[in-house]
Image (cartoon, grey):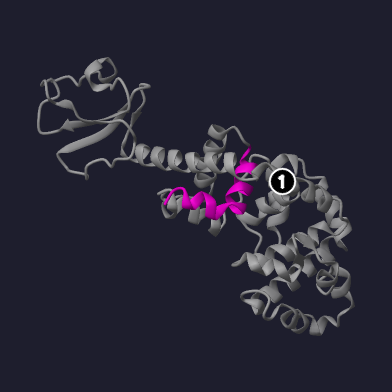
Amino acid sequence: MAGYPNLPEMDELWPDKGFAVIIEDDMKPPDSDDFVTMLSQFDSPDFKLPSKHESYSYWVHDEDGNRYEREEWRLYKSKRKLTEAVRTVLKNKPVEEQLEKLKQKGKRRAKRDDVIWVEIVLSLCTLGGSWGAETVIEEGQINEYKYGSLSFETLQEIDQDLLNQYLESRLSGNVRMHPTKAEAIEENFNIIKEKYGDPTNAKQVFQQKETPEEIMKFLKQFHWIGDKYARNIPMDLYLDEFHNYIAVDSRIKGILETADYPVEEREYTEIEGFLREVASELGITAWELDRTLYNFEDSISSRMS
């Protein structure tokens, strides 16, 4: 029976520099001299593998001894493309200054007694469009006057039979899908009132959660708080437990699509894992990458176009 060649021992298949496209001809016996050959070499990874063919298999070897199957090569190129773009932005834009401001703002917000309610309201307002933050945010800070009309204390004073009507009128023109979001805010208001009494007690229970999984489970009990916001809320507050997390939203997905990453083919945790690898190569935390992608989206995308 014909034996398959030991590829790592075949020096001619590994380039001295750059990358080599390797072809396996399945129409030939494995012990033939040209069953596996080097098809071509490239100095940079800016090339595509030949189209799939039932009789041939293709992969890539690099000068460091790595081997990439077709899908691995696709992900490698996406990671390299994104990493280089972010690295350039890190060097040329005031990223560190912006991140420090966000860290300090998060720490200050985390001290609020009503922080859980603030974050729920802000999350629902921004769902489907970050501009919805202007409902309670002004110049990057919570506008207490704007927020006051949606504060837990204010909602307690409203006739509960008219609460949904009040919320609809308050959100109308300020957020997308305001009727649905008014309903979600009302439902979340009732969850806090019935389970914790008020936001202060809800915060105390929240602070007792010790692991990221426990924290996310607590947050996901609230309507419309899913994988993204269950991460984004503690990331907003710059909690230690979430420095290695990514809040994957439409803006980040858009950047990934520009990097030719197959967003629609991946689950949330796969996307998050990919971005963690990018952060590791850049020598920054996942939180720092997340906030860099969000705040410098245009600069990063333009370097990949």
Reply yes or no: does residue 74 show up in magenta.
Answer: no
Magenta segment, which residues? Answer: 285-305
Circle 1 residue:
214
Q: Is residue 143 visible?
A: yes
What type of secondary structure mainly makes up the magenta span? helix
Residues 210 and 151: in front is: 151
- Looking at the image, residue 12 sits to the left or right of residue 220; the answer is left
- Looking at the image, residue 75 sits to the left or right of residue 244; the answer is left
Residue at the (69%, 50%) spot, across then down: 216
Whole-percent x, y for residue 110 in the image: 82, 51
Which quadrant of the structure image shows residue 3? top left
Residues 247 and 217: in front is: 247
Residue at the (61%, 47%) spot, across then down: 292
Mark 1 nearby-residue class (10 Å; few <14, some 14–19, many ≥20): few
Whole-percent x, y for residue 224 in the image: 65, 64
- The quadrant of the picture occupied by the N terminus is top left
| Up-down relation of residue 163 to residue 3 (above or below) | below
